[in-house]
Amino acid sequence: MAIERKTRLHSIEIADDGTVFVKMKQDTIADGEFMKSEWHRAPIQPDADPDVVIAAVSANLAREGFDAVPTADATIAKTLIASVQTAAVKAAYAAKKAAAEAALAPAPN
C-alpha cells in the first residue's frame, strides 16, 4: 500500500490583536484514494518571527510524516503577515503585552 501525505495552506485568520493564525490541511492518500484530512493551526503573534514559526511547523509536520509547509504557501502566509503586522500593530501588541505582564507582577513589599 502506497501512502502519500500532503500538506497545503488551508486558511489564514487575523485576530484583533494582530495575531495571524495559519491553518494547514494535511491529507492522507492511500493507493491514490483519499483517506482523511487532519489540521495543523499555528498562531504567529506580532512579536514573533514568521520564518521561525513556519520552520517549527514544518519540523512538526515532518515528525508526523507529512510534507513541510510548501514554499509557495509559506510565501503567501508571510506576505499577508507582513501586511497585517505593521509597526503600529506591533507597538500596540507590545504595549498590551507589557500591561498584562505588569498586572501579573507581584506587588512590592
Image (cartoon, rainbow, N blue to C red):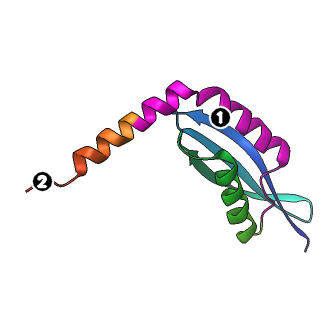
**Which residue does the numbered mark 1 point to in the structure image?**
81
Magenta-highlighted residues:
66-94
Residue 102, percent from left and from top: 26, 45
Neighbor class of circle 2 (other Cα within 10 Å; few <14, some 14-19, many 20+) is few
* Left or right: 96 in relation to 6: left
Residue 85, percent from left and from top: 58, 31
Q: Amino acid at mark 1?
A: Ile
- State yes or no: discs 1 and 2 in contact (Cβ < 8 Å): no
**Helix, strand or loop status at disc 1:** helix
Disc number for residue 108: 2
Furthest-left residue in this view: 109
Residue 83 lies in the magenta-colored region: yes
Image point (36%, 35%), residue name: 96
Classified by dominant secondary structure, the portion drawn in magenta counts as: helix
Furthest-front residue in this view: 109
Q: Quadrant of residue 94?
A: top left
Depicted 59 relative to depicted 49: above or below: below
Q: Nearer the viewer, residue 27 or 71?
A: 71
Task: Work out which quarter of the rendered image holds the C terminus and state it.
Answer: bottom left
Q: Nearer the viewer, mark 1 or mark 2?
A: 2
